[in-house]
Image (spheres, helix red, strand yellow):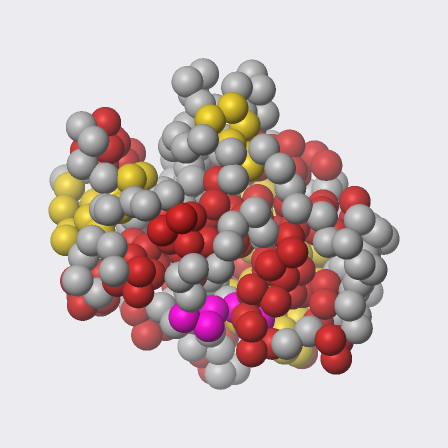
Amino acid sequence: MSLRCPACADTYEDRWRCRCGEPLRFADRPRPSATAPAAADIDPAEGLWAFSEFLPIERRVSLGEGYTPLVDASAWDASFKLEYVFPTGSFKDRGATTTLSRAVSLGVDRVIEDSSGNAGVAIATYAARAGIPAEIYVPRDAKESKLCAIRRAGADTVRIDGPRETVTEACLDSVRRGEGWYASHAWNPAFVCGTATMAYEIAAQRGWSAPDALVVPLGHGTMFLGAYRGFERLLEIGWIDRLPRLLGAQAAGYAPIADALDRDAAASAHNAAADGIRIREPVQRSAILAAIEASNGDAIAVTESETLSELDRLHDAGFYTEPTCAVAPAALRTYRERGVIDPDDDVVVALSGSGLKQ
C-alpha cells in the first residue's frame, strides 16, 4: 500500500501528495493471476469488489456499490453506463469505498474533503459507514440537497465563499494544521483506483471487449483517469485487445483541458448548470492530457443550453440524472457532428449522478 511519485520516484507510506507537488500513485499494481473470467464466474452481488484482484486495497468499508447497469440507449445510438445507480447516487461511491477502506487500514480517526457536492456526499456517507468523523468543505452556493445529504451522514460542513479553488485552499489549510486525513477525490490515489473499476465492469459486461469510444463528464478527471487506467490495465494483461478513445465533456467556461487542446468554441459562455465539473485547475491536468494522447481521445466544452436541452431528453427517456450528467450525451452529439465519432462506432456514455440531488 506504499505510494510512489510518477515524476520523481520518491516513495511514501502515506501522504496526500509528493513533496515535489505531483499526485501520487500506488507503488505496486496487483496483477490477476488468471485469464479473463467468464460472465458466469463474476458475482455482480460483490459490486465493484468483484474485481478486487486489481485493487491494492483490502475491502473494509462497503455498501454494496458497483456493477452498475450497462443499458441500450437507442435514441443516442449508444450504450449508457448508469453510474448514478449507487448508494449515494453518483459514481463517486467507487472512490469513496476504496478511499475509506484505505483510511481504516491506516487507522485514520478523522477525514477531511472539499467538494461541490457528490464527492462530499460519498465521503461523508462512507465515513459514517466506517465510524469515522468527517468534515466536508463546500462552496457557499452548493446545492442544498447535497448539503442535506452530507449532514444526514453526520459530517460537519464548512461553507466557503469564493470560487472552487478557494474552497480547496481552505480545506488544505485544515489538513496542514493536522486536523484530519485528506480523503480527496482529486488527490488521493485510492480514489482513482476505485473509479478504475468502471472500466473493468464495462469490459466484462461486453464480453471482455472495449467500446470504440467512451464519453464521460470531465472536471477533476477522477472518472476519466479511472476509466483510462482501468482499460490500460486490461490491455496490459491481455483481457481486451485495444483501448477505447477517451472523450471528455467539460462545462463551458470551466474547460481547461478543452482549452489546452484548442477545442473550447464557447470560451465566453459559462455553464452554471453543470456544477459538478466547474473546475478550472484540475490537479491531474498533465495525466488527463497524457491519457487523451495515449487513447487518441479528445475533450470539448458543452454550453449550458446544450446541457439543459440534453437533460430534458434524458428525463423524457427515463434516465433521471442531474444536470452535470447531461454534458456527456450532449458532447456525444458534437463529437459525431465533428466526425470524431464515426456513424458505426460502438460508443458507451457514462451517466454520473442522480437527479434526486438536483
Answer yes or no: is residue 67 visible: yes
Residue at (25% x, 60% y) in the render? 131
From the viewer's perspective, is residue 291 above or below residue 7?
below
The part of the image, by quadrant, that contains residue 207 is bottom right
Which SS type dominates the magenta stretch? loop
**In this image, 1 relative to 88: left or right?**
right
Q: Describe residue 121's horizontal placement relative to residue 224 as left or right.
A: left
x then y, percent, for residue 5: 53, 25
* Residue 98 lies in the magenta-colored region: no
- Residue range corresponding to the magenta coloring: 63-69
Residue 139 picture location, percent across and down: 21, 46
Pick whichever, 294 or 261, lies toward us.
294
* Residue in view at x 36 percent, y 51 percent: 104
Q: Residue 65 in magenta?
A: yes
Residue at the image point whose x is 19% and y is 49% from the top: 135
Give the tally of numbered discs. Answer: 0
Q: Position of residue 182 (x, y in %)?
A: 31, 39
**Residue 303: % across, % down:** 44, 52
Instruction: Name the one closer to the observer, 20 or 128.
Output: 128
Q: Is residue 345 visible?
A: no
Residue 242 lies left or right of residue 67; in this view the side is right
Residue at (66, 60) in percent of width and height: 200
Quadrant for the C terminus, please.
bottom left
Query: In the drawing, does residue 40 fall left or right of residue 241?
Result: left
